[in-house]
Amino acid sequence: MVNRDFFSALEQLEREHKLNQRMLLEALEVGMAAAFKRETGEGRAVAVKISPERGAIEFYAYQTVVDGEPIDETQLTLDEAQDIKPDAKIGEVIGEDVSPKQLSRIAAQAAKQIILQKINDAKKDQARSDMSNKEGELMQSIVRRVDPLNIYVEIVGTQMEGVMGSSDRVPGEKLKVGDRVKVYIKKVRDTTRGTHVSVSRSCAGYVRKLFEIEVPELRGGLVKVKNIVREASYRTKMAVYSEDPNIDSIGSCIGTKGTRINTIVNELSGEKVDVILYCDDPSEYIARALSPAKVLMVQLNETERIAKVVVPDDKLSLAIGRSGQNARLAARLTGFKIDVKPYSAIMSSLDQMNDKDEQSDADNEVTEKPAIKTQQAQDQAESYQTPIAEPIDYYGDAHGYGIPPYAENYAPEDIMYRQAPPMMDYPNYDMSNINYDSNIAPDEYNPNLDYNANNPYTEDGTQYIPDADSQYNPDADSYDGGY
């Protein structure tokens, strides 16, 4: 059956609605075959072949050749098959042309319903495909409905509806039905109820796309955006750089006399925009990110990603921003936790540390009171009559005792009065051989002296015995006539 008008109308629908020809023809073949079977009562399998090149529609009824008696009308015996096709074999499918001279009303109605359904499906698929390609782009939209939770917009040119949640609105912005606004396509996803499109006017991507529209260098890739953060209606910070040293990245974004950035600020209803130059040095990058505040010093802990920043006292509020806004955006932009301190607080802390160090040094100058190491030396020191402070270490000699330190190193109230050690009988002891110098430090040894301060014995083993009338004078530099 040939119908030129049918194929002409089909081609026009394909052009107007951007339908896929192959998919449309396959759907028509299935629908028209089912309509033909209902109308004629045909029990055999029916297939329709549509040939746009020849402008023909052909109907075929198919049967399978079986060995034995057929079960239903879809089968036939080998003898019946050979009457139609002499070389037919068992298992072969034999087709018969059953095309009517013209399409019946039922077949035409079925074709119409299929075409309309496919047109609707094709429009949805095309719109979904177009929106998927538009994800991350700015598009014009018209506000169609406003409720307390969401704003519903119609995306111009797609017949798709976008949903703007409360978190995607700009604080303080009032939109009314019929307003034409730009929206950023955040996400396109398929749901059981169709395609869901999420749009936003408060995300950082919205500002980034505005810059790409206004700045050809960004759009062409000569200037690149390292990172961008935003708190809608308050401030946006964007770090840019260029691999070409001859290109001024910041100047490209600002424009001549600020024309480019002023256009963006007007679109954002006066929102502040900071454009900074990205730097590989984290300290310099953090200092720039805190603009417009001036930074005096940055101390980094790259392991914990923490930065301590010092700013002038009169710039502290500017560095922190309203409710911490400037410091918070700088932290998000750089990836460091930023702690902002005024210069006076740092200097005060350093002064306190210096005072503590000076006090510690003064405390260290006081001589520590040493302790006796053996019980024997301690027991013997308890019987000393000579006024001494705590006895120092026992020096290990078989006949040795602890040597008292110099009295001038101790306050009078620290002096303890003890009895002298018992006399020891040394027949070779000669008082005239003793040469005792009280000014020798306890840890020094002079081999030229018969007596050394570290051992109360002479080199020949005799003991030095102080004069019994020796007295301690706290105002003197040494003992008088003895220890």
Image: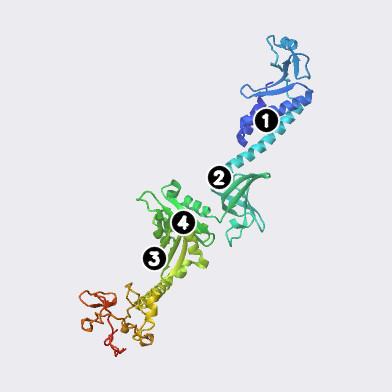
Q: Secondary structure at mark 4?
A: strand
Front-most of residues 14 and 460: 460
At horizontal 52% and vertical 62% (from top left) the residue drawn is 234
Q: What's the distance in space between the residues labelled 2 and 1, CA to CA?
A: 29 Å
- Label drawn at residue 180: none
Judge depth for marks 4 and 2 and give the one in front: 4
Residue 440 in the image: state x and y as whole percent.
25, 79
Left or right of 120, for residue 477 = left
| Residue placed under numbered mark 2 in the picture | 134
Which residue was labeled with disc 3?
297
* Label 4 or label 3, whichever comes before in sequence order: 4
**Residue 165: x and y, percent?**
62, 55
Q: Which residue is mark 1?
A: 27
Question: Which numbered circle lies on residue 238?
Answer: 4
Q: Earlier in the sequence, mark 4 or mark 2?
A: 2
Image: 348 above or below 179: below
Q: Amino acid at mark 2?
A: Lys
Nearest the eye: 18 or 196: 196
At a point 69% along the width and 36% down the height, the residue shown is: 117
Of tags 1 and 3, the one toward the viewer is: 3
Q: Indicate left or right for 411 with 197 as reference.
A: left
Sequence-first tag of 2 and 3: 2
Query: Sequence-wise, which precedes: disc 1 or disc 3?
Result: 1
Q: Are the two marked residues, 1 and 3, in contact with CB atoms closer than 8 angstroms?
A: no
Q: In the structure shown, which secondary structural element does the residue marked by tag 2 occupy? A: loop
Question: Can you tell which of label 1 and label 4 is closer to the viewer?
Answer: 4
Name which of mark 1 and mark 4 comes first in the sequence: 1
In the image, which is nearer the foreground, mark 2 or mark 3?
A: 3
Specify the amino acid type for callout 1: Ala
Going by the image, does 299 lie left or right of 205? left
